[in-house]
Amino acid sequence: MILVMKQNASARQVAEVIARIESDGYTAHLSEGGDHTIIGIVGHSPTPLKAETYVPMEGVEKVVPVSVPYKLASRSFHPKNTEVPLNGSHLGGEKVLVIAGPCSVESREQIIETACAVKEAGATALRGGAFKPRTSPYSFQGHGEKGLQWLAEARERSGLPIVTEVMDPALVPMVCQYADVLQIGARNMQNFTLLNAAGESQHTVLIKRGMSSTIEDLLMAAEYVLSHGNNRVILCERGIRTFETFTRNTFDLNAIPVLKHLTHLPVIADPSHAIGKSEYVEAIAKAAVASGADGLIVEVHLNPAQAMSDGRQSLTPQAFQQMMTQIRRVAQAVDRTA
Ligand code: PEP
Ligand code: MN
């Protein structure tokens, strides 16, 4: 249930409503919706939640039942776009922001050189995995904390903030020491213990859509993080599994406008994992921007043929630079910048 307060509702009236919500055993989440304060009522309690409780209260304009299970992620709770700060810009704002870097952090030199190359081409943040979720236990699993230290050095050298995956709730505090954005991977999108730990950290969280998850599943994953009062959440469409085998996954372009409609959170696209072949990455990146994505996360490798993971889908720095040029043109066509 959502309470929309009157435009001139006083702080005392808002406080009284919150006190009532809490005394009934629920949690109140506040959102400033431009002219109105919006109060989301979430949680469960033996006291039934009734509109009649709040309708007569001073300062309440209307009570809106929310039929969707993702209350805090829904646009009705927060009509304006949530803008998540990233390197002096905002994801969800006018500018389309691009996060780029290798799939895995392979060495100190590799990550520093890649960071400088993607920055030069216009990237806003650096990606790179130190903990890698691999289908096979015999594949390269990442350099762990050493990889995080190299990422921190790459940030110092390039000025780019770091986006990196965390796979284990117990490692959230350690990854937070190095990362600016915690990435929750597709394979962990419904690891609820991990989502709770990421929410509690109050760090910015990037949630990638699970390969067999629905749009609603993704929004519920976001709800876990938001329920901890952490509203710095970014959603990412990265392709889903279908019967098609020519491409690694099938990019669900539908998800971009649908998510932008259903939620206030920024939505980005990962064309690299979505299609899995570098020669098509630019086309998918352009489609994502044209359809309203707020940003992209793209894999870039200095020498894709030698990459320790995902070389087949990685762009060279030159190809990435060319993609950026194309993205800027598409962004302009849809009244944005990049
Ligand atoms: C990655 O970003 O390298 C990655 C493993 O992505 P996903 O979780 O989307 O497969
Ligand atoms: Mn990858």
Image: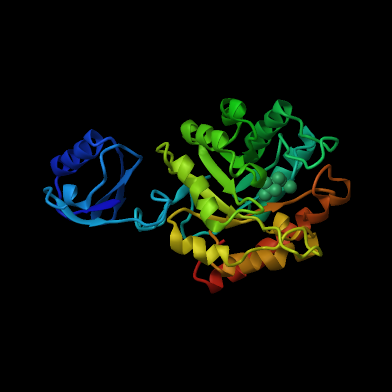
Q: Quadrant of the C terminus?
A: bottom right
Q: How many marks?
A: 0
Query: Residue at 22% of width from left, 34% of height from top?
Result: 23
In the image, 291 versus 253, the foreground residue is: 253
Q: Is 186 on the left-hand or right-hand side of 257?
A: right
Q: Is 68 on the left-hand or right-hand side of 295?
A: left
Residue 108 position by quadrant: top right
In the image, 89 versus 19, the foreground residue is: 19
Residue 244 position by quadrant: bottom right
Looking at this view, name the residue that lies furthest to the right.
305
Relative height, residue 301 to residue 179 (above, below): below
Q: Is 139 on the left-hand or right-hand side of 7?
A: right
In the image, 248 versus 335, the foreground residue is: 248
Residue 80 image point, x, y percent: 37, 57
Residue 270 image point, x, y percent: 65, 55
Query: Residue at 67% of width from left, 58% of height from top?
Result: 240
Looking at this view, name the residue that lies furthest to the bottom.
333
Relative height, residue 327 to residue 176 (above, below): below
Query: Residue at 51% of width from left, 65% of height from top?
Result: 258
